[in-house]
Amino acid sequence: MSIPSQPQPLSIPPRLLLGPGPSNANPRILAAMSLPAIGHLDPFYLQMMDEIQTLLRYVWQTENELTISISGTGSAGMEASLANVVEPGDVVLIGVMGYFGNRLVDMATRYGADVRKINKPWGENFSLAELKEALETHKPAILALVNAETSTGVRQPLEGVGELCREHNCLLLVDAVTSLGGVPFYADQWGVDLAYSCSQKGLGCPPGLSPFTMSDRAWEKLQKRTTPVSNWYLDMNLLNQYWGEPRKYHHTAPCNMNYGLREALSLIVEEGIENSWQRHQQNAELLWEGLEKIGLVCHVEKQFRLPTLTTVRIPEGVNGKAVSSYLLQEYNIEIGGGLGELAGKVWRIGLMGYNSRPENVLLLLEALRKVL
Ligand code: PLP
């Protein structure tokens, strides 16, 4: 085999990531991640894990004991949530209003669930009355909803859903990948039983971890299983023995990722979670006003727009892909294209974590004005 030529030292173009994620990380996070690795059973590391759990409970707004960061991206959190509570034959009702609802359907099917779908056009969400009716019809063991549908930019309100689920003796499972840190989320107040997110969006870390939380009700369902969790890596019975007592080795923790997450969470405590939500909202509103001024139309009704991710309709006659390529080449700005049903119809603009700042909004608006 021939020897490859010596690669140049790695250098990354200075991109401003204003797409659906990842977002740029605060330099403090990157600095924390460059610290030396440490043993995953080192007393210092175990103490840091406790700290991460406390900080995560704050951003999730929960008292759930089982609140951890899963090694893996947001999809690992999705997988963990389903794998632990779905037993073959369980009815799982999934609200599909975009691409990631369909991913939940795919995964739940693989875990043997009797999947029932309710659908909404891409750009809308479910009302409480619609969810109530579906719970009455399907009598599921689990209701799964996407709180922030990244493919459409729609926020699914969760107020009152947890109570409905309790009345119908079912668990509430929520995808908060594009909401945690950037959009108000009250796990306990809303009666959320399982929720997962990612490190690379509202928390502003690089990708690689999935914050996860599980209520006592979900834990009970896990304990009553008659079949083992069919995913070893994500089995909470095992992971709980590493994150809690007896601190038993499970897998080699990606310690540098967790240093970064700890720094990101510490930055949120410094700012205050409510202030972080408010900052995301204010910068999104600045973007929406600016887009309107240059004649662009947001795909989602204002009330249900996500502050973290805005879908903008590509005007008639404009080549959306050419515009985003131009922004990348000429301005080093990344924005996203449409996914699934919205492919070729919208751009997706993310203002997440460290990137949710007025100067980024103004820079993007200026670049768009020049390109269009
Ligand atoms: N769910 C939603 C709503 C997402 O936006 C994403 C990714 O963007 C995922 C799940 C999957 O997360 P990841 O790509 O980090 O695995």
Image: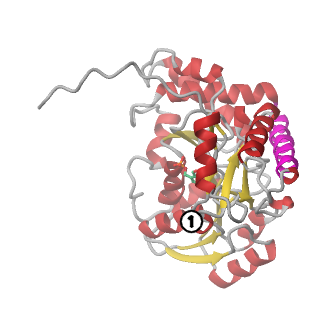
- Above or below — where is 78 with respect to 358? below
Q: In the displayed structure, does residue 134 sit left or right of residue 108?
A: right
Residue position marked by numbered label 1 in the rendering: 340
Q: Is residue 296 left or right of residue 25?
A: right
Image location of residue 109, percent across then percent down = 46, 70
* Residue nearer the viewer, 177 or 174: 177
* Numbered range of the magenta stretch: 272-291
Give the residue furthest to the bottom.
137
Image quadrant holding the N terminus, namely: top left
Is residue 199 among what the camera can see?
A: no
Residue at 71%, 43% (x, y): give it: 60
Amino acid carrying label 1: it is Gly
- The kind of secondary structure element at disc 1 is helix
Which of the 4 image quarters holds residue 258?
A: top right
Figure quadrant of residue 66: top right
Farthest left residue in view: 1
